[in-house]
């Protein structure tokens, strides 16, 4: 008689089409137990491959690379079955908070479509739209419904589904990245008391930074910020007078040599790793939130582009002719884009506080490949005046030798960049 893991059905194969890499993950979920962490999932297979430099900013080349890479990883790694669940890339996703008049639930989609057309000049018929009811807010003396809207172009969605179909995968679900981030840590918030905990997840990737604030496991705020690793590398490239690719490698090597990446620990709950900063949250009141003259009644500034191209920005480093030695382990080497990111994060915190003035953020959990630069995370946490920790969504997995073999993933090290694939594996099929 079969025992243990064989009784469970493997998760769909999670496919994360990132700006910097393609990641694929499959797990065997452990049986859930009410109000407990339950048995940890077992890793079936994990694989990752970097996007070539010449394909990073060319949509046609990037899609072609993804199509071939998915086939190769499916052949090389012990993935089981053909069911797949995909992430819609953050840089192709519109994430927008909006307030609409309180209406019947069936009228939400019509109201959201009208908002997208009138305010953002987006044709809703060409978008795949999902919305989340955050709660009721009072604006100018009237009650309105706070809605978190996420949308992606139908063309982008169908392109990713086509890539999966070319590898003979059966797509059973697609989810936006912010939702996956929360799902990856959902089991931490199973108790009734956990619903009162307020956590801010900051996932700093290559092209974008995802900000998600959750009450327990319920997402109540999200934003995609176009300031991230590539923007940091662009300033370093200008300062050092090297190519963007060389600057990126230099930054990765600097973080590795500094030993900033914490070791993975399979102990229960170890996916919330060592503290980054211990300063208490002080932005908990409306009075604190108004510092700096920010207009709190407005949603955070729109900075999301829905496009096939990985976002790029003009070089922020200026036109200095005198080159100075660059300390890549110091946040000062990326001061301008980092300051822009911190300003955006402050706006996110302030906007959240206008919706929930009585519920302070308890801590920040840093995720994404850029969280290996510990000094950068420490500066962000200090400037936000919030305690912070590093996250590792794969730490709790039961790993096997077969799953570890030649997948391009060092499972002995912390892997903060895998929150989206892990969240996909734990998400519901919705197609």
Image (cartoon, helix red, strand yellow):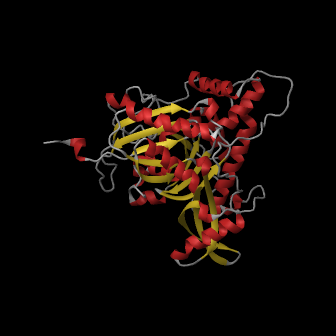
- Nearest the viewer among 75 and 40 is 75
> Where's the N terminus, which quadrant?
top left
- Residue occupying the far left of the picture: 1
Q: Is residue 312 above or below residue 217?
A: above
Residue 328: x, y in percent? 68, 26
- Residue occupying the far front of the picture: 166
Q: Is residue 287 above or below residue 142?
A: above
Write down the quadrant of residue 357 in the picture.
bottom right
What residue is drawn where x is 63% and y is 72%?
Answer: 100
| Residue 16 in view in this figure | yes
Write down the quadrant of residue 206 in the picture.
top right
What residue is drawn where x is 38% and y is 39%?
Answer: 396
- Nearest the viewer among 276 and 186 is 186
Residue 333: x, y in percent? 72, 30
Q: In the rendered view, does 103 fall on the left or right side of 166?
A: right
What residue is drawn where x is 38% and y is 57%?
Answer: 191
| Residue 281 in view in this figure | no
> Where's the C terminus, which quadrant?
bottom left
Residue 226: x, y in percent? 67, 46
- Nearest the viewer among 295 and 170 is 170
What residue is drawn where x is 76% and y is 38%?
Answer: 336
Q: Is residue 184 above or below residue 149?
A: above
- Nearest the viewer among 181 and 216 is 181
Q: Is residue 120 above or below residue 75?
A: below
């Amino acid at each position: 008689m079969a025992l243990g893991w064989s009784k469970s059905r493997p998760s769909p194969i999670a496919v994360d089409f990132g700006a910097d890499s393609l990641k694929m993950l499959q797990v065997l979920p452990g049986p859930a137990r009410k109000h407990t962490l339950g048995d940890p999932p077992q890793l079936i297979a994990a694989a990752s491959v970097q996007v070539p430099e010449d394909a990073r900013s060319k949509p046609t080349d990037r899609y072609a690379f993804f199509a071939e890479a998915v086939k190769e990883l499916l052949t090389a790694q012990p993935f089981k079955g053909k069911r797949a669940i995909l992430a819609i890339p953050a840089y192709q996703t519109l994430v927008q908070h909006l307030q609409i008049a309180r209406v019947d639930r069936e009228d939400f989609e019509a109201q959201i479509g009208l908002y997208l057309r009138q305010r953002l000049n987006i044709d809703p018929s060409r978008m795949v739209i999902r919305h989340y009811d955050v709660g009721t807010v009072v604006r100018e003396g009237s009650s309105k419904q706070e809605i978190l809207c996420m949308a992606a172009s139908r063309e982008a969605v169908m392109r990713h589904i086509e890539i999966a179909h070319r590898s003979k995968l059966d797509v059973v679900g697609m989810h936006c990245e912010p939702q996956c981030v929360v799902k990856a840590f959902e089991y931490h918030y199973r108790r009734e008391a956990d619903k009162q905990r307020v956590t801010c997840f900051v996932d700093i990737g290559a092209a974008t930074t995802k900000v998600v604030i959750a009450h327990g496991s319920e997402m109540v705020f999200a934003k995609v910020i176009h300031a991230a690793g590539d923007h940091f590398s662009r300033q370093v490239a200008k300062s050092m007078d090297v190519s963007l690719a060389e600057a990126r490698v230099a930054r990765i090597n600097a973080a590795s040599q500094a030993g900033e990446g914490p070791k993975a620990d399979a102990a229960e709950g170890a996916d919330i790793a060592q503290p980054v900063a211990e300063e208490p949250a002080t932005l908990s009141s409306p009075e604190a939130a108004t510092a700096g003259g920010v207009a709190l009644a407005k949603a955070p500034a729109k900075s999301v582009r829905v496009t096939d191209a990985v976002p790029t920005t003009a070089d922020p480093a200026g036109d200095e002719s005198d080159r100075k030695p660059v300390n890549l382990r110091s946040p000062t080497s990326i001061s301008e884009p980092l300051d822009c990111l911190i300003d955006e994060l402050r706006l996110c915190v302030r906007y959240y506080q206008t919706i929930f003035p009585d519920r302070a953020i308890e801590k920040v959990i840093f995720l994404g490949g850029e969280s290996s630069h510990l000094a950068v995370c420490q500066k962000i946490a200090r400037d936000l005046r919030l305690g912070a920790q590093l996250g590792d969504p794969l730490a709790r997995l039961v790993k096997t030798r077969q799953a570890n073999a030649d997948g391009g993933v060092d499972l002995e090290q912390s892997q903060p960049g895998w929150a989206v694939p892990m969240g996909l594996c734990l998400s519901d099929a919705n197609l």
